[in-house]
Image (cartoon, grey):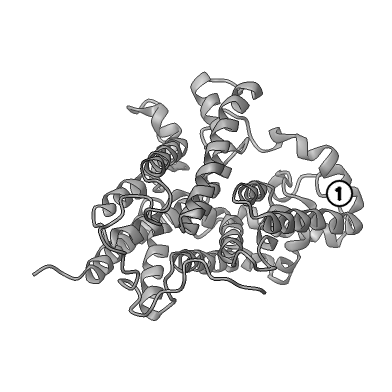
Amino acid sequence: MELPRTTLTLILLLGTAVLGVTLLFTTMDPWMDSGGILVGGLDVHIYRDGGWRLLHDRALYLEPTHYGLLYTYTPFSAVVFLPLLLVPWGAVTTTWLVLNLAVLFGVVLQSWRMLGYRITGHLALISALIALACTFAEPVRTTLYYGQINLWLMLLVLWDFSRGEHSRLRGIGVGVAAGIKLTPLYFIAQYLAQRQWRAAATAALTFLATIAGTALILPRDSFQYWTSTFFHSGRIAPDVHPANQSLRGAIAHLTHGPAPIWLWLLIAVPIALVALWLSAELARRDEPLLSVTVGGLTACAVSPYSWGHHWVWFVPLLVYLIHRAQTRPRWWLAAAVLYPAIAAWTYSYTPTWVSVGTFLLPPWWPLAQVLMNIYVVLYLVTLVSLVVAVRRRPRGIDPIVIDPPAAVPDTRVLAPVAPLPARPVENA
């Protein structure tokens, strides 16, 4: 007798979670100085140092910070990171790791909510299993190891896009996220493409408020950042670095040299425009999660420099694939392809030099150019597939644009209660 899909889902996700956590702790010594998951925290200590510099009137951008690295975020971010000073230096890594895991769980829950599910104990269990499985996804694993802020920004953006179209709060999350790290500015363009004028204006004004407000507190650092530091992308890393998983990075990898700006723009601008159109179409077809996920992936792709850990937007994409698999089991195949492609596979060059991620596997391996640009390849495949699906199914026939089932899907498969409206209207 065939098992109910809820049982199959639990079995598949439980197995993947156990496998993911096992691989997380066995593919690399968790206490290894140069990559162990339990001894990282480099970036969160830099965040904390930014707050410390603000408090002690030290220059943010003219002096090296922790481990001699440069501070690259906005002046507003240093204000946001001030609460980290309440955490003792020796406890920062562990505290931020736990908080990041909680935010990861929140991202998965928020993704389900945007798909129309109610939050129940059963759905929380499903979400916990997905979150555990995703700890072995390279973007998440590297975010956890370095103590990055990517998951927090993604949750802010997801929350923002989950607000009702007439909500006065819609746009604030994007504006704050962009004030901390500039990449979320892309979502203002996405609001414009969706003709969400009020949300776009709110996001833009919130972003400008972070600049103006910080300029009053940190006039010297603000002037330095917006007139000089902002234009020096070389402070991050060279274009050709294999970890640069962006269109510009792919061009550099394929040409074996710095990517010409004109060539990058010639490719990135049309792709961004197509993605904006696609996101707007998906939103109009009541696919809010898929719409914002396409936006998040596009922001990573068109950014001048995107580290692998910026691509945490693969997490809501996995949630979406699992959602579709509840009515069309063959969608498990898509998830089964995506997960190992973004997994945190390791390769030991020496006992102390271990790389993490498919794009850092040895360059002499077969299909090395594909592996080196794997996130861009996955993004382009996703983008093209969605464009084809949307073009084949005229708007208004069915809100589900990809391979719709014969009947309306039952979103209660994972949560045995009535689903939330897909697009709630809020006024607060």
Q: Residues within 10 Å of mark 1 (few under 14, many from 20)?
A: many
Which of 65 and 122 lies nearest the eye of the viewer? 122
> Which percent across, then down, holds residue 27?
37, 51
Left or right of 302? Residue 318 is left
Left or right of 145? Residue 121 is left
| Callout 1 secondary element | helix
Which of 37 and 358 lies nearest the eye of the viewer? 358
Task: Judge whether 108 appears above or below 371 on screen.
Answer: below
Which of 235 and 350 lies nearest the eye of the viewer? 235
Which of 371 and 273 lies nearest the eye of the viewer? 273
Residue labelled with disc 1: 221
Q: Is residue 32 visible?
A: no
Q: Quadrant of the C terminus?
A: bottom right
Residue 198 falls in image quadrant: bottom right
Please tell me which residue is depicted at 61% across the width and 48% down the height of the picture: 190
> Which percent across, then down, holds residue 162?
56, 65
Q: Quadrant of the N terminus?
A: bottom left
Q: Amino acid at mark 1?
A: Asp
